[in-house]
Image: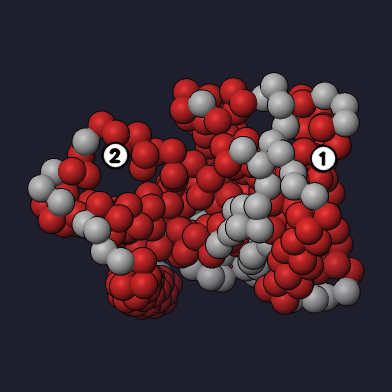
Amino acid sequence: MKKQGKIQLLDIVPIFILAGIFIIFTVASNGATLSSYNLKLLCTNVVPVIIGSLGCIFVIALGGTDISIGASAALCSSIAAVISGQTAGWVAIPVTIILSTALGALIGFIVTKFHVGSFMCTLAILIAGRGLLNFMLQQSSIAAPKGISFVTSFAFTIILLIALIVIVWFVFEYTKFGFYCKCIGENERTVHSVGINVKKIRIICFMISGLMAGIIGLVQICRVGGSTSTLCNMLEMKVQMAIFLGGILTTGGFSAKIYKLIIGSFTIVVIENGMIILGVSSALSEAIEGIILVAILITTVYCSKVAVNKDLKMAALADKESVAESAAH
């Protein structure tokens, strides 16, 4: 029997979807999508989505979710901005990272210790975080930390993005920690039964997600010039959609791949960018985006089912051949 190829249908469909959408918008905009200005804008807009996805991929691999990213990013960077305003601008960097990582640890502890669903827990944190941010803004305006505007430069953000992709890719694909994360998503009981500390891994995964949220918040608050009630708004939704548009299943496991989240991130950003270039009104744009995203998700789910059915048939065929060989001997 021939060995099954490593490339699955679910792995390549998101690539064709992204290419198709990009070509459609390029033709519809008479090439405006390919302008140097727009390509730079695409790269700038995709940075927070990819960074958020890089953190969330660990949680997704477990079969969980984290929709508190946007609120965590906005709240922690705003608190850090207030503290740095009374000390030094650079203080905002470590403070933001420490706060967001600690918040991620808190979420992981609650989910693990009290067996609360990650969706409900992070939803509660999202609501609480936004509420606290609005309360802070009612008291006084919050300006961006001074002296660290370099974090918003195009060169810095691209270098930062590449560095984070390389680090996360190595940890996720070539360390025991990354392997365990995917194994937990496939079968948590089995992983626990062989003596692996599942609770510890889950808490660390949420800490990584929080860490990435902090990095995004710091970049965005400096880019905007200060904190607002809409800072990093809907970022968590973009991250979730990017992950699923890339072909990563909600159950996580070994379907989670770094290149998939990058493809998914570009897909959702290209759709939003294309609507703006074509001059579609915001209300109609949201409706069209929703329809396109649903269609893509249906395609992804269908391809996933096809891949699973194919694997089952291959496994059944292998079992039959094994039985036949045993009977022959």
**Which disc, if any, is residue 82?**
1
Give the crowd class for mark 2: few <14, some 14-19, many >=20 residues within 10 Å: some
- Where residue 211 appears, as percent x and y from the top left, is 72, 44
- Which quarter of the figure has residue 191? bottom right
**Between residues 307 and 62, which one lies in front from this camera angle?**
62
Distance between mark 2 and mark 1 Cα atoms = 34 Å
The amino acid type found where label 1 is placed reads Val
Q: Which residue is mark 2?
A: 38
- Which quarter of the figure has residue 77? top right
Question: The C terminus appears in which quarter of the rendering?
Answer: bottom left
Q: Residue at x 15, y 51 (%)?
A: 29
In this rendering, position of residue 324 left or right of residue 48:
left
In this rendering, position of residue 259 left or right of residue 192:
left
Asked whether the residues under the numbered discs 2 and 1 touch, taking CB atoms below 8 Å apart as contact, a structural biologist would say no
- Where residue 170 appears, as percent x and y from the top left, is 58, 36
**Between residues 108 and 41, which one lies in front from this camera angle?**
41
Instruction: Give the mark nearer the N terminus: 2 vs 1.
Output: 2
The amino acid type found where label 2 is placed reads Asn
Callout 2 secondary element: helix
Would residue 88 be seen by someone viewing this image from the given angle? yes
Callout 1 secondary element: helix
**Between residues 260 and 182, which one lies in front from this camera angle?**
260
Q: Is residue 219 above or below residue 315?
A: above
In this rendering, position of residue 224 left or right of residue 142:
left
Q: Residue at x 82, y 24 (%)?
A: 88
- Where residue 138 appears, as percent x and y from the top left, is 78, 58
